[in-house]
Image (tube, helix red, strand yellow):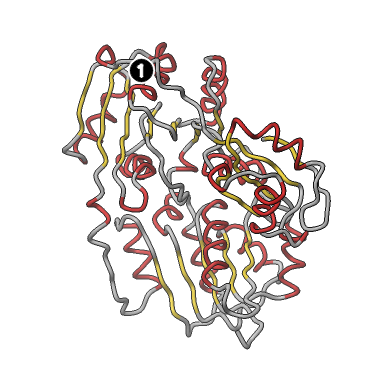
Amino acid sequence: MKKFRIQSIILAPTRELANQIAQEIRKLSRHIHNVKVLTLCGGVPFKPQAASLFHGAHIIVATPGRILKHIKENNIVLDNVDTLVLDEADKMLDMGFYDDIIEIIESLPKQRQTLLFSATYEENTANLAKSILINPTIVKDENEEKTVIAQKFYGVNEGNKTSVIPALISSNRAKSVIIFCNMKIKCDELADELSDLGLDVLTLHSDMDQKQRDETIILFSNKSYPILIATDVASRGLHIDDVDLVINYDLAKDPKTHTHRIGRTARAGKGGLAISLFTVNDEDKVEDIKDSFVDIIFEEISEIEDDLTFKIDSDFRAIFINGGKKAKLRAGDILGALTAGLGLQKDDIGKIDILDFCSYVAVKASLVTDTVEKLSNKKIKGKYFKIFEK
């Protein structure tokens, strides 16, 4: 890009989605010389973001609250913005960002292209579109709803919810599972309870700082842990492939949230399975969800056959390396250190994620301890790094 000015702004509802969007833009623009993409999200220090803005960028990916704060403190120059994208607009409205979005838009040049993406198009989204778009072209993806998600509902007593989780997973031979709870405290409680049952679990909710959330998503997406317990922060925007099973430990507050939860098990056009647990206190929610879906199967808990031959575990474990992009590390450097350096086969190595200051690489669980020990004593790209298992 010839002009080293902010030319495009993408707004997203959550930090996780903003980071994933930025990552995809960097991949798409890697053949374009010197494109700078900057993320502005809450949960990370404000002053370093202001310093990065001072040095300039081409594309900003941001959550509404954080970019608005930079606008109010005059840290960001918007005179050259010619493209605005609102991703997951309906989710931003659900989170109460309407006023922030309007205030951000009022700070932008009037001559620009505006694109609004939304999984649902209800009245509030339509009203936002009318207020910010001029004679828009509406494009609807007719194929999205063709993905097949099998849904099963089980009535349970509140006291035995946790005890049925292992059987639900083993009977469906699920290797990658997301369990949704409505409250952060319940996520932590359920994680403790499942850990006591011998299961490896991760949690994801808004009380975690950005570093913890980023690490959690990486460890789950690279198949180092089989189970992620999350609030609805994970129900939208997180693109994690090959989730075999979604379990609604608590029923969603409304059918729309339920739709987005179960959609985590049907990425990239694949089908999936979603299981929902409900108690006698959930009858109204069950009726609301039933009205929105015609293919729900109600089964008895007693019909579940716990497959004791199935091991609820991951084939991989993650290795943490305390060096990343800032240390000029690339995926090829790590792959070479593991294969040519240590003799691992390519099939022994899973996903490699490289962040600014650290990296994660998935290695076959049976090899991880030996790999950490040997790699700690070898140089990667001419340097020694601290390396340990996650």
Q: What residue sits 66% from the left and 74% below the top?
A: 57
In the image, is residue 117 above or below residue 304? below
Amino acid residing under circle 1: Asp
Of the pair 143 and 92, the residue shown nearer to us: 143
Q: Residue furthest left?
A: 294
Q: Quadrant of residue 157?
A: top left
Neighbourhood count class around disc 1 (C-alpha, 10 Å): few under 14, some 14–19, many 20 upward: some
Give the residue number, with chain letter if any, for mark 1.
307
Q: With 38 as the anchor, is 295 left or right in this view? A: left
Q: Residue 52 appears at what percent x and percent y?
A: 73, 68
Dot 1: element = loop
In the image, is residue 87 above or below residue 238? below
Q: Residue 158 appears at what percent x and percent y?
A: 39, 15
Q: What residue sits 46% from the left and 55% below the top?
A: 92
Q: With 57 as the anchor, is 348 left or right in this view? A: left
Q: With 86 as the anchor, is 45 left or right in this view? A: right
Of the pair 193 and 183, the residue shown nearer to us: 193
Q: Residue 229 appears at what percent x and percent y?
A: 50, 32
Q: What residue sits 46% from the left and 40% below the top?
A: 232
Q: Quadrant of the C terminus?
A: top right
